[in-house]
Image: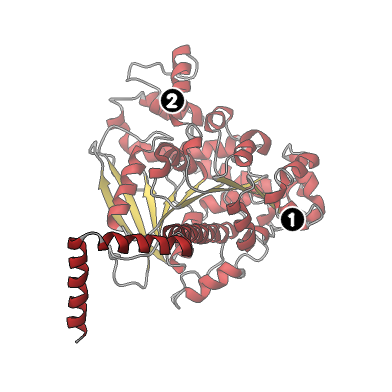
């Protein structure tokens, strides 16, 4: 009780004492916000003008300062700029409202309950090592049939929550909007997360995609006719990027989106967060693991685990110890430090980034209080050199927040389509998040682009097969002359001709 009172007092102090000029204000106060985040005005201009072909606006455009698309110039990038209207229609909340605070809107999206009209049907998947993961298929509450036919051609949207297993209102609203647009949303739950039973003494490491690979195979078996798209939230992006890098062109995913991803995860664990956020995340993970304290005591040092006060020590206690005889202070010994570095060599999300073979959109805000400083935590060179990666960088939005002035009204091109497609029961009728509209537009645009490219290739192949008018006449003349010199072939031609005459009679 005292802990919750302390957290409440901290939130009240953040609202009342925090200088308003740092987080609140109009567009003219954006420079003060960037300076408070350690980003100079010149750096922000450099970010907006890193790739002029992908910026999509002039230097005097207000929206260009609000959101910028950073990528390597390509045909797909030009197609996205032309057909994704939502990319340039971001209007963050300004003025004296709590939604203009990056910290408050991030906490709101992560912790505040959400009464969603969406229900879930769970599939428990037994893995090759007898472990269990779960897929929660989202279905509207009005739907009587709880299962979807395997012959359905509806696209599947695989949603990967954060690495702590917390199902946020952001995930629930994404499932709701995806249903209204004809997708089949499925939430991936790791071992022991979100009520999934822990049947083995093995937890999934931060960037180990083995379990996700088996889950994708099951999805392909269950829905073989539908395209597969993937969305990750926060630290869950580490798992998605690891999977796309290891699988390469065999990922079965058409396109992917990372919402407020963490790219350099080792330094994120080492630098830590501000103490209220870190305390809350460590406490939540301890509560989730407390039910397995006795079972996990055979393989890890549970005393060090449940006495840890930082995310790094907790992660080390789970995955960087060899048994119950390990040191209680893993972060202080040289051997444990080497084990920590070896752990991230296997789990860093960008370790195989060059093998990614599908379009990946990352949506980040410069004032993200969880990820940290943009210049040191976002690999801008990756998006400027790799044609498969695209970055939507906004000056505001917090962590998975992206609150807008029109939020709650359902305005927007994609939101209007979703409202028209949604039934009268209310699915898709609530406020639509800008990031959700943008990612669905990204999926639609990339699918249309690849479909047009495939049609162009097929048309070019048919033209090459015909070989032009003169070439075709030469080929037919040679065929006839050859048959004239071969009695057997001539006999076959006359036989086919006689059969056609008898068939027409």
268 lies left or right of 60: left
Question: In the current view of this chain or complex, which residue is farthest to the bottom?
Answer: 505
Q: What x and y, as percent, mark residue 6? A: 57, 42
Location of residue 339 by image quarter: top left
Question: Which residue is at a point 63% across and 46% down the rendered structure image?
Answer: 71
Number of numbered discs overlaid on the protein picture: 2
Q: Can residue 493 be seen in this view?
A: yes
Question: Which residue is at a point 74% across and 54% down the rendered structure image?
Answer: 64
Residue under label 2, please give it: 343
Question: Which residue is at a point 30% across and 27% down the rendered structure image?
Answer: 297
- Element type at mark 1: loop
Check disc 1: other Cα within 10 Å, few if <14, some if 14-19, many if 20+.
Answer: some
156 lies left or right of 376: left
Which quarter of the figure is the C terminus placed in? bottom left
Identify the mark nearer the N-term, 1 or 2.
1
Q: Nearer the viewer, residue 1 or 34?
A: 34
Q: Nearer the viewer, mark 1 or mark 2?
A: 1
Check disc 2: other Cα within 10 Å, few if <14, some if 14-19, many if 20+.
Answer: some
- Circles 1, 2 touching at the beta carbon (< 8 Å): no
Q: Which of 106 and 359 is in front in this view?
A: 359
Q: Can residue 192 be seen in this view?
A: no
Q: What x and y, as percent, mark residue 255? A: 48, 52
Residue under label 1, please give it: 57
Give the answer, above or below, for where 206 lies relative to 101.
above
187 lies left or right of 146: right
Could you tell me how far apart the alpha carbons at marks 1 and 2 are, in whole angstroms? Answer: 42 Å
Question: Which residue is at a point 17% across and 67% down the rendered structure image?
Answer: 491
């Amino acid at each position: 009780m005292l802990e919750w009172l302390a957290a409440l007092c901290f939130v009240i102090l953040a609202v009342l004492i925090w200088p308003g000029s740092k987080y609140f204000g109009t567009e003219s106060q954006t420079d003060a916000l960037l300076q408070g985040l350690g980003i100079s005005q010149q750096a922000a201009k450099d970010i907006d003008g890193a790739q002029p072909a992908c910026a999509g606006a002039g230097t005097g455009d207000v929206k260009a300062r609000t959101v910028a698309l950073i990528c390597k110039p390509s045909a797909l990038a030009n197609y996205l700029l032309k057909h994704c209207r939502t990319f340039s229609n971001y209007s963050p909340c300004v003025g004296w409202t709590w939604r203009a605070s990056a910290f408050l809107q991030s906490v709101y999206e992560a912790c505040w309950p959400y009464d969603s009209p969406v229900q879930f049907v769970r599939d428990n998947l037994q893995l090759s090592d007898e472990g269990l993961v779960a897929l929660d298929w989202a279905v509207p509450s009005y739907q009587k049939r709880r299962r979807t036919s395997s012959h359905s051609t509806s696209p599947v949207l695989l949603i990967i929550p954060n690495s702590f297993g917390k199902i946020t209102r952001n995930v629930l609203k994404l499932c709701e909007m995806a249903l209204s647009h004809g997708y089949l949303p499925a939430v991936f739950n790791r071992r022991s997360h979100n009520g999934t039973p822990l049947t083995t003494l093995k937890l999934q490491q931060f960037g180990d995609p083995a379990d996700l690979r088996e889950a994708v195979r099951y999805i392909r078996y269950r829905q073989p006719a539908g395209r597969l798209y993937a969305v990750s939230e926060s630290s869950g992006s580490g798992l998605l990027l690891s999977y796309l890098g290891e699988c390469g062109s065999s990922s079965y995913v058409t396109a992917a989106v990372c919402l407020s991803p963490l790219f350099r995860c080792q330094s994120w664990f080492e630098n830590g967060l501000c103490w209220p956020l870190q305390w809350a995340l460590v406490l939540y993970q301890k509560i989730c693991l407390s039910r397995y304290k006795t079972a996990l005591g055979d393989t890890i040092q549970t005393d060090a685990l449940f006495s840890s006060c930082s995310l790094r020590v907790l992660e080390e206690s789970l995955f960087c110890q060899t048994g119950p005889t390990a040191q209680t202070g893993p972060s202080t010994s040289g051997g444990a430090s080497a084990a920590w570095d070896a752990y991230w060599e296997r789990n860093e999300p960008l370790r195989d980034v060059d093998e990614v073979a599908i379009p990946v959109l990352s949506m980040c805000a410069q004032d993200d209080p969880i990820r940290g400083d943009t210049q040191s935590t976002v690999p801008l060179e990756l998006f400027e050199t790799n044609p498969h990666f695209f970055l939507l960088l906004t000056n505001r939005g917090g962590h998975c927040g992206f609150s807008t002035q029109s939020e709650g009204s359902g305005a927007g091109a994609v939101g209007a389509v979703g409202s028209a497609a949604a039934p009268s029961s209310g699915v898709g009728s609530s406020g639509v998040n800008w990031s959700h509209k943008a990612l669905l537009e990204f999926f639609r645009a990339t699918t249309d682009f690849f479909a047009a490219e495939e049609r162009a290739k097929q048309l070019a192949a048919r033209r090459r097969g015909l070989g032009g008018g003169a070439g075709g006449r030469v080929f037919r003349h040679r065929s006839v002359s050859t048959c004239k010199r071969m009695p057997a072939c001539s006999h076959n031609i006359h036989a086919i001709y006689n059969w056609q005459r008898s068939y027409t009679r």
